[in-house]
Amino acid sequence: MTSALPALVSPEELHAAAAAVTVPLVVLDASTALATHGEAEPYTAQPLRAAYLDAHVPGAAFVDVTNELSDTSAPQLFTMPAPDALAAALGALGIGDDTHVVVYDNVGSAWATRVWWLLRWLGHDHVSVLDGGLGAWQAAGLPVASGAEDDVAARATPGRLTPRVRPELLATLPQVEQISSGAASGLLVNALDPATFRGEQEVSPYPRRGRIPGSVNLPLFTFLDPATGRFLPPADLRGLLQDGGLLDAQGAVTYCGGGIAATVPAFAAYVAAGVDVAVYDGSLSEWTADEGRPVDVG
């Protein structure tokens, strides 16, 4: 089945597709907030369900990325679940093999691109990110809904989603170690802000400050228009990715703190250049937990 919508979909395109009802469509609000605490204290995540209940794209369900789409028994927050567990969690939201999924958030699109990446890792290509999230939807003058009725309706008819895992989209710790040490080709791309990349942030939630040796910095926010929250035009995205070395790298891997922000440059590479990039799911939360692994600062 050809995807009903492009990977990056405008509010107007989504509105028209929802009205046409030509393919099964599930819209997900993945909005989540992160909070930092003391030095070396892990951050905590808060699903923004109250904001969803106040206003969301009509027909959208709310997905709790922290719990529904993560392995809550793992040492690191947001760890990807096993394929069958992830497929079951997404199926519970009404997603089946023929469903086109559109996901958004209201906090910078990284949670939306995380769900996009999870679905593509699972082998489901019919997935889009709503450009600019709820803010862009409202700026376009489109209607919003409130309350829990849409979420209840989406979950009323579970879908059957078949896992067809793409292992090349997930970078493992041994792979990252090899790239970092120079034993394997590749490029490690840190998607966090420059201060965190240098280990100079005000408060660090990671066991140790710094970055994986050999990394370059492509902050997630540079891919977005600060005025609108929408992604930059494809030509501008390609320029950023090219300047950062990602498009020419043989075996590029993006990472961040816990595998969320890292999906933004991976999504940008796919949208702008059709390039698949692996994401290191454990990211700094896993890497810095072992004092035997080196970090660079400055």
Image (spheres, rainbow, N blue to C red):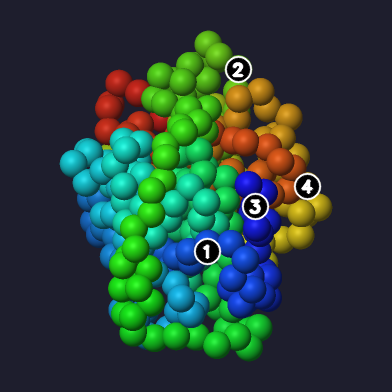
- Report, in whole angstroms, how far the alpha carbon at label 2 lies from the one at label 3: 33 Å
Mark 3 residue crowding within 10 angstroms, few (<14) / some (14–19) / many (20+):
some
Q: Which residue in the structure is indicated by mark 3? A: 3
- Whether 234 is drawn above or below 253: the answer is below
The kind of secondary structure element at disc 4 is: helix
Q: Which mark is residue 25?
A: 1
Q: Earlier in the sequence, mark 2 or mark 3?
A: 3
Task: Classify residue 168 as left or right of residue 160.
Answer: right
Mark 4 residue crowding within 10 angstroms, few (<14) / some (14–19) / many (20+):
few
Q: Earlier in the sequence, mark 3 or mark 1?
A: 3
Task: Classify residue 107 as left or right of residue 90.
Answer: right
User: Which amino acid is tagged 1?
Assistant: Leu
The kind of secondary structure element at disc 2 is: loop
Q: Which mark is residue 155?
A: none
Q: Which mark is residue 239?
A: 4
Q: Quadrant of residue 225?
A: bottom right
In depth, the one of 32 and 115 nearer the eye is 115
Q: Which residue in the structure is indicated by mark 2? A: 185
Q: Furthest-top residue in view?
A: 183
Tag in front: 2 or 1: 1
- Report, in whole angstroms, how far the alpha carbon at label 4 lies from the one at label 3: 26 Å
Question: At 35% across and 36% down in the image, what residue appears?
Answer: 83
Q: Residue 26 location in percent, x, y?
A: 48, 64
Q: Earlier in the sequence, mark 1 or mark 4?
A: 1
In depth, the one of 265 and 31 nearer the eye is 31
- Report, in whole angstroms, how far the alpha carbon at label 2 lies from the one at label 1: 40 Å
User: Which amino acid is tagged 4?
Assistant: Gly
- Report, in whole angstroms, how far the alpha carbon at label 1 lies from the one at label 4: 33 Å
